[in-house]
């Protein structure tokens, strides 16, 4: 028969082994990772900016038109329907766009190299977004397509580079509601602390650079 002190020691040892086993099992569990993030690239073209995303990150459920883009990345810009697609835009066309724009367009361009490589020499700002923020961004883009009687997006003209097209878009272009304002609104919709009334490319780029390390949402 085991003496009481010895019995207590055995029980204490068993409890200790059980606790150690639990701690070892707990420590073996993978630590929770950081929240899922996706990236939007702000591309400066001098007087206006565009937004680029990885096509694989886009849900066709949210932005079904992206299926027409043939490339690893897709860049989107918004602007006046006459000035933006014009092969040789004039100052007069720019003034008319600012005060009496008749319709707007989306420029959707697909390409394979990374944005910083494809737009070499142009400022490209990488802004991390949460998964929810990225979905909100792509939903904002999708909402700016106009559709024809056949229910398909209306192609206005060939695009400028890559596999690109100009699509007729919703919204009216104005001096204080221009392509840079559109990009700022898109980032704001994604949860970025950016002024949605921003009208210059430089200001959008500056605000986006402040988000490169902290991201949005």
Image: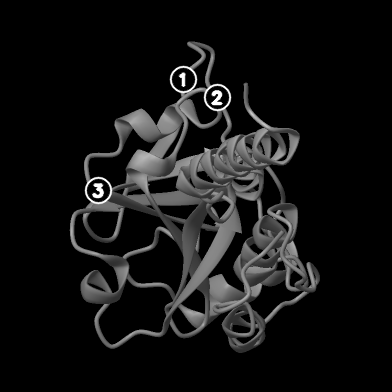
Q: Is residue 131 above or below residue 215?
A: above
Displayed quadrant of residue 58: top left
Q: In this figure, which residue is indicated by the disc labeled 2?
A: 147
Q: In this figure, which residue is indicated by the disc labeled 3?
A: 72
Choose between 23 and 134: the one closer to the eye: 23
Choose between 113 and 156: the one closer to the eye: 113
Residue 47 spot, x, y in % from top left: 51, 82
- Name the disc covering residue 126, or none: none
- In the structure shown, which secondary structural element does the residue marked by tag 3 occupy? loop
Quarter of the image containing the N terminus?
top right
Question: Crowding at label 3, few (<14), some or many (≥20) Cα neighbours within 10 Å?
Answer: some
Q: Of label 3 and label 2, which has the lower sequence position?
A: 3
Residue 153 spot, x, y in % from top left: 47, 27
Question: Crowding at label 1, few (<14), some or many (≥20) Cα neighbours within 10 Å?
Answer: few
Circles 3 and 2: CB atoms closer than 8 Å: no
Residue 125 spot, x, y in % from top left: 47, 77
Circles 2 and 1: CB atoms closer than 8 Å: yes
Report, in whole angstroms, how far the alpha carbon at label 3 lies from the one at label 2: 25 Å
Q: In this figure, which residue is indicated by the disc labeled 1?
A: 152
Q: Of label 1 and label 3, which has the lower sequence position?
A: 3
- In the structure shown, which secondary structural element does the residue marked by tag 1 occupy? loop
Quarter of the image containing the C terminus?
bottom right
- In the structure shown, which secondary structural element does the residue marked by tag 2 occupy? loop
**Is 141 positioned to the left or the right of 46 in the image?**
right
Q: Is residue 136 above or below residue 148?
A: below
**What residue is rendered at 78% in x and 72% in y?**
176
């Amino acid at each position: 028969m085991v003496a009481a002190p010895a019995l207590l020691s055995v029980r204490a040892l068993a409890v200790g082994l059980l606790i150690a086993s639990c701690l070892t099992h707990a420590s073996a569990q993978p630590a929770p990772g950081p929240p899922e993030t996706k990236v939007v690239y702000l591309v400066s073209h001098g007087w206006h900016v565009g937004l680029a995303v990885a096509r694989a990150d886009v849900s066709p459920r949210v932005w079904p038109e992206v299926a027409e883009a043939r490339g690893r990345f897709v860049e989107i810009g918004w602007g006046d329907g006459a000035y933006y697609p014009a092969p040789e835009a004039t100052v007069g066309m720019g003034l008319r766009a600012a005060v009496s724009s008749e319709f707007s367009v989306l420029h959707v361009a697909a390409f394979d190299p990374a944005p910083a490589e494809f737009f070499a020499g142009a400022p490209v700002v990488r802004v991390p977004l949460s998964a929810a923020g990225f979905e909100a961004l792509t939903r904002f883009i999708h909402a700016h397509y106009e559709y024809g009687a056949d229910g398909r997006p209306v192609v206005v003209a060939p695009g400028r580079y890559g596999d690109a097209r100009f699509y007729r878009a919703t919204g009216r272009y104005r001096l204080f509601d221009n392509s840079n304002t559109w990009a700022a609104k898109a980032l704001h919709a994604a949860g970025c602390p950016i002024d949605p009334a921003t009208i210059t490319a430089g200001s959008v780029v500056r605000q986006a650079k402040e988000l490169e390390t902290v991201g949005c949402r």
